[in-house]
Amino acid sequence: MGKDPAGVATAADGLHVYVSNPTDQSISVISAETNSVVDEIKIGGNPLGLVAHPSKPVLYAADWDNHRIIVINTATDDVTGYLNTGRTPSGIDISPDGTKLFVANRDDNNAVVIDVESGDIVATVAVGKAPFGVTFSRDGNLVYVANVQSGDVSVVDGRTFLVLAHIPVGEFPYAIAEDWKNGYLFVSNQQESTVSVIDLSSKREIKRIDVGDYPEGVAYEPNLARVYVANWFSNTVSVISTKSLEEIDAIDVGDGARAFGKFILP
């Protein structure tokens, strides 16, 4: 990989995984068949959050230092354009129908909605303080935003982009995974070494699960009824049962596990 890999996105066809290397200003392309790097895309920026289009060969990278979204053609691995955003874009997600990008701007305390076809910002949403991780609901009707410094999750209407609720969680919430089968959100709390479980029907936290140190990326696997959490400082991946809401395993990995994004292949 490149230096300090952080963000992850998986291609919709399951053939490739993309990893952002902010320090090297690059994105590594991994073959999911061989588990080896097959390309490195130099982008001239500091990419963090990544998301792949659900039906087109396009990857979007949040360029942290240059306050923009970088658009990449994944058929050729070439940069094809740039989209305007706010200051220090971090988390990014795309609506399930592929028409809207939702980008968290950490230093503006807001998020922007970008029309994919036109490239224009069509809405600006005031969320909590220092928003970071962004996740669309499976049906696209809601967007969830983890606000690092205000310690809560903003729930945003995915059509009107109005804020519906702010749900308090633990310290420094970073990333969010939706368990759409059981109606839960799992939120990694960086500085508390926990994961908050939010019940979406009541819009409140119902449990806090102890995991490894400095949890960051979090992803849901519906077939196994598991949530996986990358713990940056303890070099483990926690495995949480969505039935018992307990950590049932901790997998040892390399030094500095991050995995910010959708890191489970479809």
Image (cartoon, grey):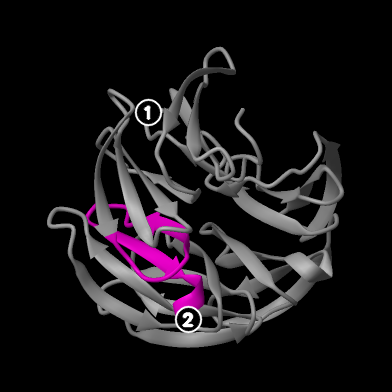
Q: Which residue is mark 2?
A: 109
Q: Nearer the viewer, residue 78 or 178?
A: 78
- Residue at 46 percent across and 83 percent down: it is 127
Calculate the distance from the C-alpha at mark 1 to the C-alpha at mark 2: 34 Å
Evaluate whether residue 217 shows in this view: yes
Q: Residue furthest left?
A: 118
- Residue at 34 percent across and 68 percent down: it is 141
Q: Which amino acid does the dot numbered 1 rest on?
A: Asp
Identify the disc placed on residue 13.
1
The magenta segment: 84-108
Give the side of residue 126 with respect to residue 241, left or right.
Answer: left
Residue 236 x %, y %: 82, 43
Evaluate whether residue 243 shows in this view: no
State which mark lies toward you, 1 or 2: 2
Residue 63 x %, y %: 43, 53
Dot 2: within a 10 Å radius of its alpha carbon, few (fewer than 14), some, or many (20 or more) residues?
A: many
